[in-house]
Image: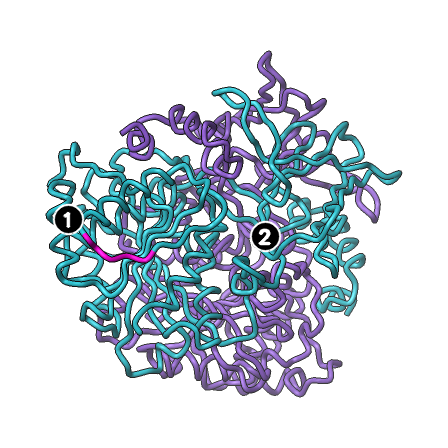
Chain colours: A purple, B cyan
């Protein structure tokens, strides 16, 4: 009976004692959560970070919730992420509380324990961005550009997220793809429109559903009646890659990297019809131009521009988010040739929406100025959205939450 | 053009310089992977761990690849996980290499940086187990009980994994569920059999697809012709919970815990027909007893025992993995009453397989001895499998990889 009580969850201490009595070290993996609560989000939106580290000499926190500060980089002094010192109490627990409430947002942070950048051991919520994993938290609410309530799982109907594989004859391999279907899709009868949502350099088919919060944003916008129910297809945009790191036969020994063997060589754009064919052969979707949208961030914005002009009959909605939209006519791929003529052919067919968004301090800002000049010169109509900030996920979540409601109207 | 070169991936240093020149701290989130390779799996299966920590006074590694050692616990001295010291070189990089090759297995480990237990910043592969996140790696191969090749993503056809929601009228809420469909399911026509695969205390609908490696094990067994193509349904077995931590409206502020409000109170077992109804209404599956299996680990083994005897016509295959299989007739739920009579009714209907597996040093070993005595007394036939080890994922992966091939023959 004693053992049952333990398993029935009446006593964690008792459970520990039993495991200890059994002499089995590995059973400890079942026990022992963190000793402190961190991060603690206070009622006013201030946040307290804690780390139990009696033997550490210095503990700091760094993250995008802190104002930037001067930092050394390989190219000299520059603004770097802010760093704040935690203070140790008598029990060896280090603590830092933000001096003011934080704005609504999804934030990433790390601890620096005697100089080593690590995730917060008390916080199981982490997200990988390219080759780094950081701890995350969300401050809800949503004033101005910030709309973090959209990034939370709320008590609304939820769509499904499927990781599956499609065949790409053009790339000669099976490839992993992430598909969001909206609430009610499985039991419904209507053909739904499709948004193709493309990641940036270093990303993969996991990027938009993790840091991008695609499923939450769509669930919430659809529940609020602000976006039409749609299927969102998130492919892997790295032509050399089968799947996200850890999900291909390269296994856990693959080291994620922003730099890839076949980046922006035209192969991915040329293979894109394999993805459309797969989606339209596998899902109950519309197959008309007005039922298809494509958008992407950074390299994915470049891909969206290239793919949509290569196939001027496919997409009525195009979104370039902080797009790496520089011409690439020097590139060997035929995809990249004759940009002006192809853009003219695309705009002659009058896409319903060509949307360009970028942050004022994005390092691709000038490239987008140049691209808009080209569109202006051709009298090609587009909608322009400029935000604060740079080449960051905060902006891409905002752009998705603004772009999706404009689709399929 | 310069900026394009950067985006095209020709120069990471150049990219950094540009971002630095732009003065935008947040853009650094794009850059800066780890400075060292860790873990490095050597050709012979030895493993080197590395951490760059020039300012740390002590760095150790702990994990299930190390032999256990005496440790202090709340209940006195006991075996604890092994700890090995890393040694610092002149550049401030700490290193430890295992003295011998490791057996094929999926291993979990953490660093101790001046006493603080953290994940390896150079390794993006991490898995959450209840309230702890650890770094992981896999040593491939497979001799004896170890069959770690099954846990790797190999170059074989891959099934799909979907996270979706079902309505549970019995529990009064929508709940998240994970479903594996085998390669070819979407394009096929045959009704497939279904394995219901249940997690243990502290787990949720993510447990079996993360540490359990269900998708990899099934992909590989099916590719080898050792398991029949089947759908694997992984529900959430915590009656009080909508979804895994971070996936419900409790958001990132939910602290995962092994102890839950409504553990083993009979409500989940009573609600199980909601799940079967959902699956059989949503997937192209068999609806006969010979086309249904149920198994689970620890609390999930208890659930499998209870659910299968409550519904003696539902499941022809039952698997109890390290099951918390103690009788609970003192419990208030009618589900738990009249165990002997219900077992008799179940075995009168001659299930094709009743499989019990446990490790020799599992703290539930005696409970399983007692349960087998009960089955023996009733002359209820079952198959018994005893392994080394205790209440650990290593065993549960082995049990799944042995149980799945016996199903639906």
Within 10 Å of disc 2 (Cα), the crowding (few <14, some 14-19, many 20+) is many
Q: Considering the image in quadrants, where does the N terminus of chain B appear?
A: bottom right
Relative height, residue A382 to residue B65 (above, below): below
Please state which of residues A250 and A278 is positioned toward the viewer in this rendering.
A250
Work out whether disc 2 and disc 1 sit on a shared chain.
yes
Q: Is residue B83 above or below residue A237?
A: above
Residue B249 in picture, x, y percent from top left: 33, 43
Provide the residue span drawn in magenta: B379-383
- 3D distance between C-alphas at marks 2 and 1: 37 Å
| Most common SS among magenta residues | loop
Q: Is residue A188 visible?
A: yes
Front residue (pair A3, B171): A3
Q: What's the residue at 39%, 54% (across, down)?
A: B385
Report x, y in % for residue B192: 29, 74
Residue B195 is left or right of residue A168, and the answer is: left
Circle 2 sits on which residue?
B125
Q: Secondary structure at mark 1?
A: loop
Q: Quadrant of residue A309?
A: bottom right
Residue shown at 50% from the left, 25% from the top? A36
Horizontally, is A351 left or right of A54 in the view?
A: left
The picture places residue A41, in percent across and down from the top left corner, at 45, 30
Q: Quadrant of the C terminus of chain B?
A: bottom left
Outermost residue on the right side: it is B90
* Sequence-wise first label, 2 or 1: 2
Write down the chain letter for disc 2: B
Residue indicated by mark 1: B170
The mark total stands at 2
Q: Is residue B37 left or right of residue B316?
A: right
**Is B116 within the magenta?**
no
């Amino acid at each position: 009976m004693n053992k049952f009580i333990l398993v029935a969850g009446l006593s964690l201490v008792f459970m520990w004692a039993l495991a200890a009595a059994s002499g089995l070290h590995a059973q400890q993996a079942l026990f022992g959560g963190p000793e402190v609560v961190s991060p603690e989000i206070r009622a006013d939106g201030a946040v307290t970070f804690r780390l139990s580290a009696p033997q550490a000499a210095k503990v700091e926190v760094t993250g995008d919730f802190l104002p930037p500060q001067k930092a050394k980089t390989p190219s000299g002094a520059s603004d770097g992420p802010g760093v704040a010192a935690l203070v140790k109490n008598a029990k060896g627990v280090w603590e830092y509380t933000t001096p003011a409430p934080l704005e609504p947002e999804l934030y990433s942070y790390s601890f620096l324990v005697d100089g080593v950048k690590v995730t917060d051991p008390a916080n199981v919520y982490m997200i990988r961005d390219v080759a780094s994993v950081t701890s995350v938290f969300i401050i809800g609410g949503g004033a101005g550009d910030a709309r973090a309530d959209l990034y939370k799982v709320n008590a609304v109907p939820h769509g499904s997220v499927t990781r599956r594989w499609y065949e790409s004859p053009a790339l000669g391999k099976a490839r992993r793809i992430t598909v969001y279907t909206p609430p009610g899709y499985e039991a419904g009868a209507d053909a739904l429109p499709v948004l193709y949502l493309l990641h940036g350099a270093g990303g993969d088919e996991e990027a938009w559903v993790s840091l991008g919060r695609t499923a939450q944003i769509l669930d919430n916008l659809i529940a609020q009646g602000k976006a039409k129910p749609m299927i969102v297809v998130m492919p892997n945009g790295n032509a050399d890659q089968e799947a996200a790191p850890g999900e291909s036969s390269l296994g856990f020994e693959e080291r994620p990297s922003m730099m890839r063997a076949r980046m922006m060589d035209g192969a991915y754009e040329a293979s894109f019809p394999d993805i459309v064919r797969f989606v339209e052969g596998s899902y109950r979707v519309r197959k008309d131009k007005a039922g298809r949208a494509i958008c992407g961030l950074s390299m994915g914005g470049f891909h969206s521009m290239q793919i949509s002009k290569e196939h001027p009959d496919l997409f009525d909605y195009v979104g370039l988010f902080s797009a790496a939209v520089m011409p690439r006519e020097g590139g060997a791929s035929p995809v990249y040739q004759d940009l002006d003529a192809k853009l003219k052919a695309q705009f002659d067919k009058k896409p319903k929406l060509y949307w360009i968004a970028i942050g004022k301090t994005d390092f691709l800002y000038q490239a987008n100025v140049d691209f808009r000049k080209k569109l202006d010169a051709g009298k090609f109509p587009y909608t322009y959205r400029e935000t604060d900030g740079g080449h960051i996920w905060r902006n891409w979540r905002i752009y998705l939450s603004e772009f999706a409601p404009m689709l399929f109207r």
